[in-house]
Amino acid sequence: MELILISIIASIITYFVPKGMAKMVALLGAILTLAYNSFMLQSFVADGTKKFVFDTPWFSDAVHFSVGIDGISMLMLLLTNILMVVILLGAMRKEWKRESLFYSLILFMQAALIGVFVSNDGIMFYVFWELALIPIYFLCALWSETGDYKTTTRFFIYTFMGSLAMLGSFIYLGSKGLVDGHTFAYDNLVAVKLSTTESMWVGLGIFIAFAVKIPLLPFNAWQPSTYAESPTPASQLLSGIMLKMGLYGLIRWFFPMVPETYEFWSNLIIILGVIAVIHGALIAIRQNGMKRLTAFASLSHVGLIAAGIATITIVGLQGALVQMFAHGINVVGIFLCIDIIQRRTQTRDLTQLGGIAKQAPYFAALFLILVLGTMAVPFTNGFPGEILLLKSIFGYHTILGVIAGLTVILCAVYMLRMYQKGMLGGPSGENFDFPDLQKSEWPALIILSAMVIGMGIYPQWIVELTEASSENILNMIKETVEGVS
């Protein structure tokens, strides 16, 4: 509750402060939120139960403002609040039109994201899910690099329609639950017993919302152009945090809500995820635009994460959670590096770049660390989660595991190609000049690079933080399945 309030208050204050102060007020608000989150972590016991619970009637006795934090929620909060500080540090390097509104929207989105990850009520979850769409829509539209509203409108329609489908499923579940009391409470919705037909339809509504947000094939039409045309902070929010809403939704809401048909949905999501791994990687290899390359690379990586979740195993869930955290760090860092390149050279086209490493060795070194993390090189943050995910998929089906395992090769191809063409060799353009990192650019890249290495050396803290909560979710699904059988 306090985390949401801090972000909302900071957002309001940021909007009303004089121009020039907004960036510092926003950064201070994000740091305070992270500091309070860290304070909560100190007293947090990862035993699988909800901590810091707050529950009060909201719209009515049926709908409560209900929050609670378990290990999985805590991990998502840490990811959100750490990356928000990094994103703001990166954004401060540039002057933005309507600066107060720009930073206020970022903090408002932070509040909505926090609400999604701590919600313990179906309607509350939906409300914050939709609230997160409002600031990111305006960030993408008002500060678009192209001024084309078609891309942003398509993104809004895709996500909004998917959200309505999820709302319909929640309302149906609520109507089947308790007649009196907190009808839309998470525990009540999970406890509803459905027939196979009901479970299929309810699952479809929830699945569409999460599949669009992740995104999974074939719900990804909005993604590449939106990532490419949005300002860098918006691209970072979309890829680093917002898509985690969909993955978190699969773990927390989707499979526990429809365990009666979990085998059908599990098979479907694993197949779609493995297809996305190959589809995204092959298209990424062909891209010369660095932002579009990163967008398709992200599609490939989240496809693997979704497939691991859908195996409904402790290894798959743990691998997914580790990789969700790692992916957020890496993709935010890659987009930041692309933005630095574009600001220096006025292009992000690989055919017009080259030779940057000779002129900016410090930048090249930090960029390389992020590239290696994305490639899941041993002792980087991408390695532990990818190993666990591939193990879970191999355990599910050997052939699908082999296909998914191609990500190791394909990712190396498109990431090393991007680094080689952009950073090595001789410059492709005329009058090429690329100053090394400025003072304002060091903090964000140092934080991200340190996390790539630190998490690669010691990923166990995520496993320990989320293990009990993951086992609770798996037991919840298995108990319902056994009751049906």
Image: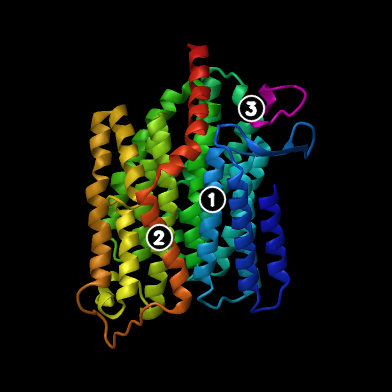
User: Judging from the image, what secondary structure is the residue with disc 1 in?
Assistant: helix
As drawn, the residue found furthest toward the front would be: 42
- The mark lying in front, picked from 2 and 3, is 2
Residue that label 2 marks: 450
Q: Which mark is residue 187?
A: 3
N-terminal label among 1 and 3: 1
Residue that label 1 marks: 78
Q: Which residue is drawn at 28% across and 45% down?
A: 278
Which amino acid, by three-letter code, is at mark 3?
Asp
The reply to whether residue 60 is in sight is: yes
N-terminal label among 2 and 3: 3
Give percent across and percent down for residue 83. 51, 58
Which amino acid, by three-letter code, is at mark 1?
Leu
Let me know if residue 400 is in the magenta part: no
Task: Please say if the residues under marks 2 and 3 sit with CB atoms less than 8 Å apart.
Answer: no
Q: Which residue range is magenta in the image?
A: 173-188
User: Judging from the image, what secondary structure is the residue with disc 3 in?
Assistant: helix
Q: Residue at x 47, y 61 (%)?
A: 235
- The mark lying in front, picked from 1 and 3, is 1
Which amino acid, by three-letter code, is at mark 2?
Ala
